[in-house]
Amino acid sequence: MRRLTGAALAILFLFPLAWSAFASVRTPSGFGLENYARLFNADNGIHFEQVFNSVAVSVLTVGGTLVVSTLGGYAFGRFTFPGRDALFLLTLAILMVPYATILIALYVLLGWIGLQDSLIGLSLVLIMFQLPFSVFMMRNSFEAVPKEIEEAALLDGCGSFRALTRIMLPAVKPGLITVGLFAFLTSWSEFFAPLILLNSTDKFTMMLTVVNMRTATFGAIDYAALEAGVTFMAVPCLVLFLVLQRSYVRGFMSGAVRG
């Protein structure tokens, strides 16, 4: 019964994506790649510039999220210091703030530090939105590792940082993959934050470009090219999830269910 329910839910969630993929190759004369040709050749379509921007934002967000959440999760999970629990709860409290309500304030803040209308500024904002979940995951992942392993490394002469990089990181690899995958999926498909924080068309990500294709002359929208854009953007997410799904599940099982 559970397998049947799981299969039904999988079909339900995969149907829109399968329909987009089908519509992206459907043409008036049959099937082909004409819609993708229009997507990449149109003046308002996806070009190398938008692909580069999306990849850059995703790489910066994933890298920054992994670094900050690893150090933060290690500190919360392994060290005792004044205000640790309060600081951890404050980090989790970011989840209770609708990020759309603070984007204007963040836009002004980025202007003060010279990162307004930049991919780096956008990446910093996306990293901030990822911190509550990421730090929570990494703290629980570190706590799931027996302390005796780390204590043995410290007795052998490793410092805290070396023990982290040599011993602890391989032990929490599933958690790292889970955090990195979530950060990638969020940054790759994010629309609202780039819409508010980016002004120059040469900084637009693929998501903004695909949405802008809906604004056409005399209301004529090329829906087939839009479906091609949706399918093109979904492929990296599907590939990464299929490749990393085992580690993704282990990350949740070993970390998220604790604490």
Image (spheres, rainbow, N blue to C red):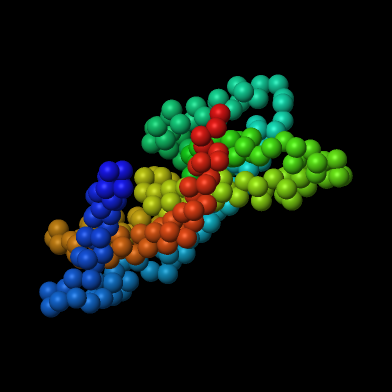
Q: Is residue 227 left or right of residue 237?
A: left
Position of residue 168 measured from the top left corner of the image (x, y, whole percent): 69, 45
Residue 2: x percent and y percent? 31, 43
The residue at the point 70 percent across, 33 percent down is 78
Please name whichever residue, 25 or 36, is drawn nearer the observer in this view of the structure.
25
The residue shown at (18%, 71%) is 26
Depth check, front residue: 154 or 190: 154
Indicate the position of residue 102 as horizontal and vertical percent values.
43, 33
Q: In the picture, which quadrant includes the N terminus? A: top left
Q: Is residue 223 left or right of residue 250?
A: left
| The furthest residue to the front | 1
Q: Where is residue 159 in the image (x, y as percent from the top left)?
A: 82, 43
In front here: 176 or 113? Answer: 176
- 221, 198: nearer the viewer: 221
Q: In this view, does 145 lie to the left or right of 235?
A: right
What's the residue at 32%, 71% (across, down)? 40
**Can residue 142 be seen by looking at this rendering?**
yes
Q: Can the viewer see residue 198 in this picture?
A: no
